Amino acid sequence: MCRVGVFDSGIGGLTVIEELKKELPKEDFLFYEDSLNNPYGEKDNETIKKIVENIVEYLIGQGCKIIVIACNTVTTVCISYLRNKYKNIVFIGTEPAIKLACDKGYENVLVMATPATIASERVNVLITNSKKDFENIYLVPCDGLANAIEVGDILRQDELIHSIYESYNDKNINAIVLGCTHYPMAKKIITKYFKNVDLLDGSNGVARECKRQMLLHNLITNKGNGDVLIINSKDR
């Protein structure tokens, strides 16, 4: 039986899992929660590749034929590398919903993501291919926010988000792209400061693309119950 593999640097991937379960209610999932190496977004690219390669090998060893990268950082840094190395595995990436924000015509968009994601070439490509002349896109490398969410440090989350608000509250922000799968878990704090702003993330699009690829590659089993087996790297 094909189990859908999913991984992230920690609990953030659960936001993607919830959307996957809606699209694929009769599939089972193996979620690799890499708390041991959290956060990814503050590591260099080569370190990220080595960490991710070990995870992919583990998921393949568990019989996964399709792997969802529930992490914007990993997707932007090394999805092309993974697809080239593991040609028999279907990889689904997660990337900041910049195109969605631009397609909706928001004039002032704040992109919150990890430092590695913000610095990636993929983000530049997304902006170049999506941005209209009237749109302003502000990139914010949210150093430390994913880790604060991972460990449940509400005070630190509040401090970091308040600092971002102080820096951009004069920009008439219409939408915020949550460019890390951890960030939806901080929506309450974000909207505390950024009132009447639309929050966008790519989780639903990831789930729909996963279903499309599973149909395309005949990987749908309809033999599961939407169960999620969680493996934490700290316990291995």
Image (tube, rainbow, N blue to C red):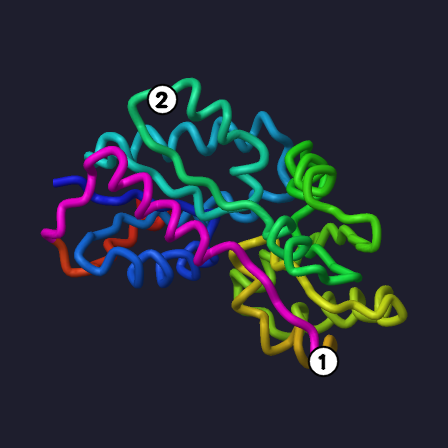
Q: What residue sits right under mark 2 in the picture?
A: 86
User: Which of the 4 quarters of the picture holds residue 177?
Assistant: bottom right
The one of 154 and 173 positioned closer to us in this rendering: 173
Locate residue 220, reporting x and y percent. 19, 44
Q: Amino acid at mark 1?
A: Lys
Residue in the image at 65% along x and 49% along y: 114
Q: Which range is magenta?
A: 196-223
Give yes or no for contact between labels 1 and 2 (Cβ–Cβ under 8 Å).
no
Locate residue 204, reporting x and y percent. 44, 58
Locate residue 139, reporting x and y percent. 76, 51
Q: Residue furthest right?
A: 170
User: Which of the 4 quarters of the picture holds residue 187?
Assistant: bottom right
Q: What residue sits right under mark 1 in the picture?
A: 195
The quadrant of the image that shows the C terminus is top left
Task: Based on the picture, tell me whether residue 181 belongs to the magenta stretch.
Answer: no
Question: What element does badge 2 sit on?
Answer: loop
Q: Disc 1 vs disc 2: which is toward the camera? A: 1
Locate residue 234, reporting x and y percent. 38, 48
Residue 177 against residue 133 in the figure, above or below: below
Label placed on residue 59 = none
